[in-house]
Image: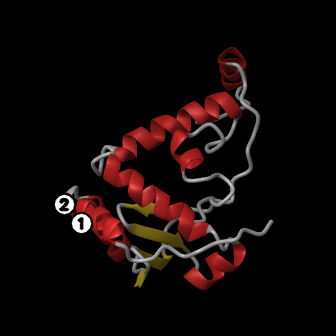
């Protein structure tokens, strides 16, 4: 699947977003994670990319904390070759940190993830934040939404895990 993509650029709106993410402490937390994982930092548009992060994550291509995109175990070029729209997707998450006033985004995101697992069996398909950031740009397939009763049954049978 290919995506017509443009890289996030520095705009006045992104400058305000990035300042908000510093003030709300989400970007400082992202920079602490980047330093703790000995990541290489660089700017890309309105984002700080921390690549080659030494983290024990195997199923995350990238994740964003404030305006910092963290790439576990690989560099930006490799990540973009596998998904050219990845930074557009992560840029949307940086906006979400700003409108959630920073760190409250984290529990809200995990609540949305749990809801998605319950409704679809995966972490992204019914996750408001992933859908808003565009599932396809994040490399996520869209799974059908199940009735809540069916999701609970699957969870109780151990077919789905949070």
Q: Is residue 13 visible?
A: yes
* Label placed on residue 95: none
- Tell me which corner region of the image, top left, top right, bottom left or bottom right, holds residue 10: bottom left
Q: Position of residue 44 (x, y in %)?
A: 45, 81
Q: Is residue 75 visible?
A: no
Q: Position of residue 22 (x, y in %)?
A: 23, 64
Q: Is residue 160 above or below residue 36?
A: above
Q: Position of residue 119 (x, y in %)?
A: 66, 28
Quadrant containing the N terminus in the rendered view: bottom right
Q: Badge 1: few (under 14), some or many (20 or more) residues near its Cα, within 10 Å?
A: some
> Circle 1 sits in a helix, a strand or a loop, which is it?
helix
Q: CA distance from mark 1 to mark 2?
A: 6 Å
Q: Is residue 140 above or below residue 19?
A: above
Report the front residue among 29 and 125.
125
Report the front residue among 48 and 7.
7
Q: Position of residue 5 (x, y in %)?
A: 64, 72
The residue pinned by badge 1 equals 19
The residue pinned by badge 2 equals 23
What residue is at 51 percent from the left and 45 percent from the top? 129
What residue is at 51 percent from the left and 63 percent from the top? 90
**In the visual, does 66 lie left or right of 76?**
left
Please say if the residues under marks 1 and 2 sit with CB atoms less than 8 Å apart.
Answer: yes
**In the visual, does 47 lie left or right of 116?**
left
> Circle 2 sits in a helix, a strand or a loop, which is it?
helix
Q: Is residue 14 above or below residue 73?
A: above
Judged by depth in the image, the label closer to the viewer, 1 or 2, is 1
Q: Is residue 94 above or below residue 7?
A: above
Quadrant containing the C terminus in the rendered view: top right
Residue reaching furthest to the front: 12
What residue is at 69 percent from the left and 56 percent from the top? 136
Residue reaching furthest to the left: 23
């Amino acid at each position: 699947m290919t995506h017509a993509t443009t890289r996030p650029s520095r705009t006045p709106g992104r400058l305000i977003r990035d300042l908000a993410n510093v003030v709300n402490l989400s970007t400082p937390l992202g920079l602490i994670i980047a330093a703790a994982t000995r990541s290489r930092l660089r700017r890309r548009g309105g984002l700080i990319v921390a690549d080659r992060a030494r983290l024990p994550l195997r199923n995350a291509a990238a994740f964003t904390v404030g305006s910092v995109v963290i790439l576990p175990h690989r560099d930006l070029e490799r990540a973009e070759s596998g998904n050219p729209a990845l930074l557009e997707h992560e840029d949307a998450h940086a906006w979400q940190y700003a409108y959630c006033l920073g760190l409250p985004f984290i529990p809200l995101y995990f609540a949305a993830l749990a809801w998605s697992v319950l409704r679809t069996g995966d972490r992204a398909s019914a996750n408001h934040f992933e859908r808003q950031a565009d599932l396809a740009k994040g490399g996520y397939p869209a799974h059908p939404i199940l009735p809540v009763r069916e999701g609970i049954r699957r969870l109780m049978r151990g077919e789905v895990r949070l």
